[in-house]
């Protein structure tokens, strides 16, 4: 089966150019069929002639702007994100990638594709760098601002399935994000979730914010409000540290010499912190593959988001989530 990926060509802060370029770069490296969704007259001139027979274009006359309300997307059926998700819904594509309005993408995807059996809420998952030169799976990072304990417990199971299928971790370790490691810490929501998760293989109890970055667990679970704050704060910290390092280097001739000697180290560090290397965040728990990319995605980020979509479809993680939740429901009843 050749995987087909629908790409929202009108999403993102920089228009279709980096999205088309990222799609072409992905076609050079991976075997899939690309479907670009958007205004054909804007997309076609960006595609080199030798790639035009490898890319399909689905016309969409509308695009959801970053300032538009997420709920408006459900009424705008001619928008690029609506049409891209409908390609997955009707089986014309196996997955969708969008760097557009994340709220709109999640709203349309949830209502048009629907949730997997037994999934209460879909969760947005991302990967954070850690000291072990690996990635920590963090969820939810924005799909659900208000959560019940049962939702957090399901996020843990979905995150474990993702870590197992996408990263090859046999029994992933996971923890609930709290204000202390002791069992007594946390709010009422996390304390109740703790009781649900007790006894499940890999559960390490409560973890703190630093555990996201030290690699002490494979999966960290929180609600979307907290997760999104962590994600945005981490981006800000990485940007500030990079700026400060450059500033200090410029002020010292000795530091300039050291920086020249450590160019490879700085290059590797930048790669670890660069969101483009992650590509995008999958929305777990839906009947289909949906990758939500950063609004400021460059071509590298789009290429990696498409790679994530291909691997996601190939991994069978959605089927694993469904069976794991069915098993959990049986064991708790």
Image (cartoon, grey):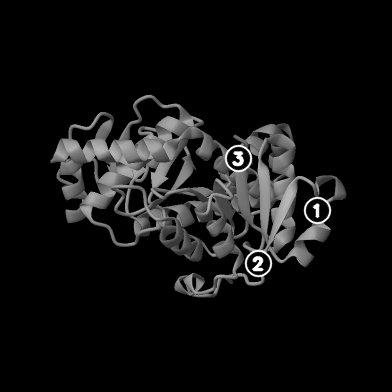
Please state which of residues 276 and 122 is positioned toward the viewer in this rendering.
122
Q: Secondary structure at mark 1?
A: loop
Q: Are marks 3 and 2 in contact (CB under 8 Å)?
A: no
Q: Nearer the viewer, mark 1 or mark 2?
A: 2
**Could you tell me which residue is drawn at 39 percent across and 53 percent down?**
227
Judge left or right: residue 206 versus residue 136.
Answer: left
**Could you tell me which residue is drawn at 71 percent across and 57 percent down?**
57
For the view shown, which residue lies furthest in the right direction?
Answer: 49
Q: Are marks 1 and 2 in contact (CB under 8 Å)?
A: no
**Could you tell me which residue is drawn at 65 percent across and 38 percent down?**
266
**Which residue is under mark 1?**
47
Judge left or right: residue 73 versus residue 183.
Answer: right
**Which residue is under mark 3?**
3
Q: Nearer the viewer, mark 1 or mark 3?
A: 3
Q: Secondary structure at mark 3?
A: loop
Q: Residues within 10 Å of mark 2 (few under 14, many from 20)?
A: many
**Which residue is under mark 2?**
60
Q: Residue 217: x, y in percent?
A: 35, 34
Q: Earlier in the sequence, mark 1 or mark 2?
A: 1
């Amino acid at each position: 089966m050749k995987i087909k990926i629908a790409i929202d060509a009108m999403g993102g802060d920089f228009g279709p150019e980096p999205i088309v370029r990222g799609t072409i770069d992905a076609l050079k490296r991976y075997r899939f069929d690309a479907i670009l969704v958007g205004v054909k007259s804007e997309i076609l001139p960006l595609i080199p002639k030798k790639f035009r027979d490898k890319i399909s274009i689905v016309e969409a006359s509308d695009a959801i702007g970053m300032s538009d309300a997420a709920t408006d997307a459900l009424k705008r059926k001619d928008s690029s994100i609506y049409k891209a998700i409908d390609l997955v819904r009707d089986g014309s594509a196996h997955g969708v990638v969008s760097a557009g309005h994340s709220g709109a993408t999640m709203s349309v995807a949830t209502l048009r594709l629907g949730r997997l059996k037994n999934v209460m809420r879909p969760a947005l998952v991302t990967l954070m760098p850690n000291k072990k030169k690996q990635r920590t799976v963090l969820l939810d990072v924005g799909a659900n601002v208000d959560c019940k304990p049962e939702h957090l417990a399901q996020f843990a199971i979905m995150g474990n399935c993702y870590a197992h299928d996408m990263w090859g971790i046999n029994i992933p370790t996971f923890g609930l994000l709290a204000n202390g490691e002791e069992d007594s810490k946390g709010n009422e929501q996390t304390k109740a979730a703790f009781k649900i998760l007790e006894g499940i293989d890999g559960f390490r109890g409560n973890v703190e914010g630093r555990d996201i970055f030290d690699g002490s667990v494979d999966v960290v679970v929180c609600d979307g409000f907290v997760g999104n704050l962590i994600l945005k704060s981490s981006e800000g910290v990485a940007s500030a540290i990079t700026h400060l390092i450059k500033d200090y280097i410029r002020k010292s001739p000795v530091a300039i010499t050291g920086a020249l000697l450590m160019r490879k180290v700085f290059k590797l560090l930048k790669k670890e912190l660069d969101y483009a290397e992650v590509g995008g965040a999958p929305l777990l728990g839906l009947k289909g593959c949906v990758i939500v990319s950063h609004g400021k995605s460059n071509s590298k980020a789009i290429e990696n988001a498409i790679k994530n979509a291909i691997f996601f479809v190939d991994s069978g993680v959605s089927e694993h989530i469904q069976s794991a939740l069915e098993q959990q429901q049986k064991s708790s009843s």
